[in-house]
Image (spheres, coloured by chain):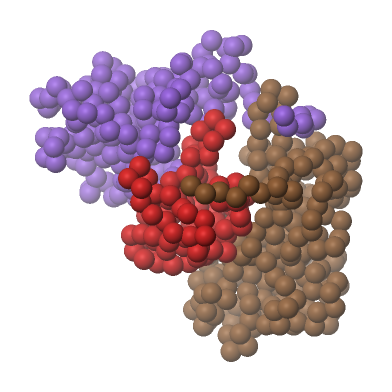
Chain colours: A red, B purple, C brown
Amino acid sequence: MDPVDGNAIGGLLIDVFGTEMTAAESTCGTCGASRPVAELVVYQRAPGTVVRCRTCGNVLMVFVKVHDVISVDLAGLATLGDGEVSSTGAGRTWRQP
Amino acid sequence: MSPVSRGFRGRSGTPAGEDSRLPPGQHVVTDYPVLSAGPTPHTPLPEWTFSITQGGATLKSWTWQEMQALPAETVTVDIHCVTRWSKLGTHWRGVSVDTLLDQVESSAPYVLAFSDGGYTTNLPTEDVSGGRAWVAFGYEDGPLAPEHGGPARLLVPHLYFWKSAKWVRGLELRDHDAPGFWETYGYHIYGDPWKEQRYAGD
Amino acid sequence: MERTAVRGRLTWQTAAVTSITRETDAVTTIELEPPDWAGHRAGQHLDVRLTADDGYAAERSYSIASAPGEPLAITVQRLEDGEVSPYLTGELRVGDEVELRGPIGGYFVWEPSDHSPLMLIAGGSGVVPLRSMLRHRLRTGSDVPARLLYSSRTWPDVIYRAELDKYRDGVRVIWTLTSSQPPGWTGYSGRVNAAMLTETAWPASQHPITFICGPTSFVEAVAENLIGLGYPPQRVKTERFGGT
């Protein structure tokens, strides 16, 4: 089953970030590649949604719907849009600009 | 409360409660859904190994040929995916994990299964022994297809199927339980489908 | 983590099905009337959610087929092993209700204010958002020169065939059929490749804006070829529909 791209999670990203994010620039925390979220590799047919860097394949974002809450992990990203992805020890969080 | 879509059934087969072989919240499917968190790896068999490691050291390793030379079993089991589909009466061929663990000396209480592509999943050692787990390379009448985890996957049917790591390459023996891939992202550390342990805290 | 609550058009709403049109054997266009639709941009999609009476819910995304300002419509291809598409293309009736939310998408969108030559490349049902762009171009009286290269398996599989065949001034539609061609076929045959793109795509020197949509493998092969022809990656927008 082929993966899709970040366009397919536009709705999920609105749920999580409160705003359209597919056009936002992302930077991979592993290889430094930058591209719009829409161009990232997305695996949706899984127990969660896994978003990978198109250049190096590393995991950038993982979304899991745990009962009624969306659990979000952004640990693989260096930057996302205009917000800062920072480490808080318990995980990576994104501060909306 | 969402309005009901007239006439929509989804993939539902027999819901749990009407079939005692189904854990709660599951439904039977006849196809075999392919779920994946990443690209299908393709390790050539001459390069394939299965290793049991501990503390960074490899205790024992088998090549594909060595694995094929071990006594293998054919088993028929039901499998239950946390995404709610179940397949009943699936046939697998593989080497019992007991056969592999018997060749190392360890009393480590936990294992972390690791796979090509970086996937991991954690289990108590007792859940991959006592005849409850296999390294499976045959499915129905043929070799296990890459999209379903071939050349070999872990098979642990008494737990949710995310514990049956596709493209498995070994087990890391551990003194402490450490969450694997899905467990890190919110799935249950153990995953008993009969207790509906889908997510952490369930 | 700070989060803004979003209301209105980005929440789920229940839309009435107002018309159903069979486009091809496996493809159906569904017109919807949501109570609170704020409009959309050409290329965006919406999410549909179906709920069974046991509470089981399934969600899918569908590209919007209508142009901004037209009655809202989606075009759905029935997938053999699908869960939602067989229902939408088979069971759904006028008068039924469907939960939807949208519009969604800020990357794969075209506005007539972009005067670059427009290059649209579709594989199968990937034509849907591109058709919205062409209708938007027409409705706004845009004179942006546009080309649509549309790959389908067979002539009966071509979606919006009659409508696309009518384009003349400013829009060139190029067909390729990959599986079989009707007698007397004068279009292309076979899959989109570098040679076909060299003949049909705007030269890179004209600085086109490109939208490619369809199965993942189609989109990636076409994008790679275009970049090989000198198209800058940031001017090639892609939307992948999955597939094997």
In the foreground, C74 or B97: C74
For the point 51% across and 25% down, the residue is B87
Q: Note whether A14 is above or below C197 in the view shown.
A: above
Would residue C95 appear left or right of C214 to someone viewing this image?
right
Q: Note whether C145 is above or below A12 in the view shown.
A: below
Residue C87 location (% of width, % of height): 75, 37
**Which quadrant of the figure has residue C194?**
bottom right
Q: Quadrant of the N terminus of chain B?
A: top right
Residue C170 location (% of width, % of height): 79, 82
For the point 85% across and 66% down, the residue is C163
In the foreground, B159 or A76: A76
Q: Note whether B114 is above or below C203 in the view shown.
A: above
Residue B195 location (% of width, % of height): 46, 16
**Total number of numbered discs in the rendering:** 0
For the point 36% across and 24% down, the residue is B190
In the foreground, C34 or C233: C34
Q: Answer whether residue B186 is visible to the viewer in this image.
A: yes
For the point 77% across and 31% down, the residue is B3
Residue A51 location (% of width, % of height): 47, 52
Would residue C92 appear left or right of B149 to someone viewing this image?
right
Q: Note whether A31 is above or below C232 in the view shown.
A: above
Q: Answer whether residue C157 is visible to the viewer in this image.
A: no
